[in-house]
Image (spheres, rainbow, N blue to C red):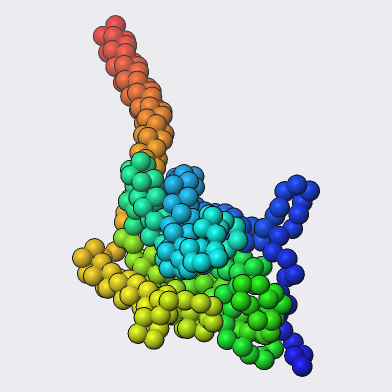
Amino acid sequence: MDLAFIPSPSRGVVELGPIPLRGYAFCIIIGVFVAVWLGNKRWVARGGQSGTVADIAVWAVPFGLVGGRLYHVITDYQLYFSEGRDWVDAFKIWEGGLGIWGAIALGAVGAWIGCRRRGIPLPAWADALAPGIALAQAIGRWGNWFNQELYGKPTDLPWALKITSAEDGRVPGTYHPTFLYESLWCIGVAVLVIWADRRFKLGHGRAFALYVASYCAGRGWIEYMRVDDAHHVLGLRLNVWTAIVVFVLAVVYLVVSAKIRPGREEVVEPAAVADASGEGEGDGADASGGDGDSVKLDKGEREAEGEAKDEAKDEAKSAEKS
């Protein structure tokens, strides 16, 4: 008998009149808002304009959602295109199924488009957003809890997740809450990136690379615990191999980038610098104008005093002669 466990919600959707509020979608939306909010604060602290992160996110988020869904559908195609399955379900993103690898890859394409339109470097924008993405993932993983999916191996630990649904091959019981493990890991990743960025002044995409590497390190062992159906290569789940490859690439980028382009970008958004210098020039003009007037006034006063002294001397000489 299990004395303690994490209960699963009986439903993943709440009906608000005619509007269904789905827990999975709700977690994704909250995560996006948190990422943009934190990213904006970090971008402004780096010298950028407030609102730039949100403007670029308008491009990055839709691309990311499409990329995440494509990765999931391609790597788990049997869920939608095998016998007895309905391919239309591949479009039902609210039922769960987003691959972070595809979301980051295609989301980066959308961000690149947005950055080019604003004339700012993509690596700097990615650095500002990196810890926010990790927090967005931490929040988004709770969508799996609402859907009773992506749990780990059976366990009787006090923090085990109790699965009650028997749909789609689920077996009711208590399992490792891998969604919780990954959520906590992502929070740790966000804290690590923020600390390292302040301590080492990471730039040119290195804060983002640190996020990628540290996330992959955790995703590898968490993925290994999961029991849902997945394709295997050489005895390991496909996502484990993906995490290993992406981890190596991120570490290589960190090392090479630090040697080629050390330090941090001095200017992340030229428009912000132009606005600031324009305001400074205006203030300087007013100040110099004020100083100029005072200088002219001082000069005029000195000239008047000189003329008065000359006149006094002339009068004194006239008086002596008379």
314 in relation to 135, above or below: above
81 in relation to 302, above or below: below
Q: Is residue 158 visible?
A: yes
- The quadrant in which the N terminus is found is bottom right
Q: Quick one: 41 or 287, which is closer to the camera?
A: 41
- Expressed as whole percent of the image width and height from the top left, the position of residue 250 reads 33, 71
171 in relation to 273, above or below: below
- The quadrant in which the C terminus is found is top left
- Say how many tags the image has: 0
Q: In percent of the image, x 35 and y 50: which residue is there? A: 112
Q: In percent of the image, x 35 and y 23: which residue is there? A: 296
97 in relation to 167, above or below: above
Q: In percent of the image, x 48 and y 50: which residue is there? A: 62
Name which quarter of the figure residue 26 lies in.
bottom right
Name which quarter of the figure residue 88 lies in.
bottom right
- Expressed as whole percent of the image width and height from the top left, the position of residue 311 reads 32, 13
In the rendered image, the residue lying farthest to the front is 83
Q: In percent of the image, x 35 and y 72: which residue is there? A: 246
Q: Quick one: 288 or 84, which is closer to the camera?
A: 84
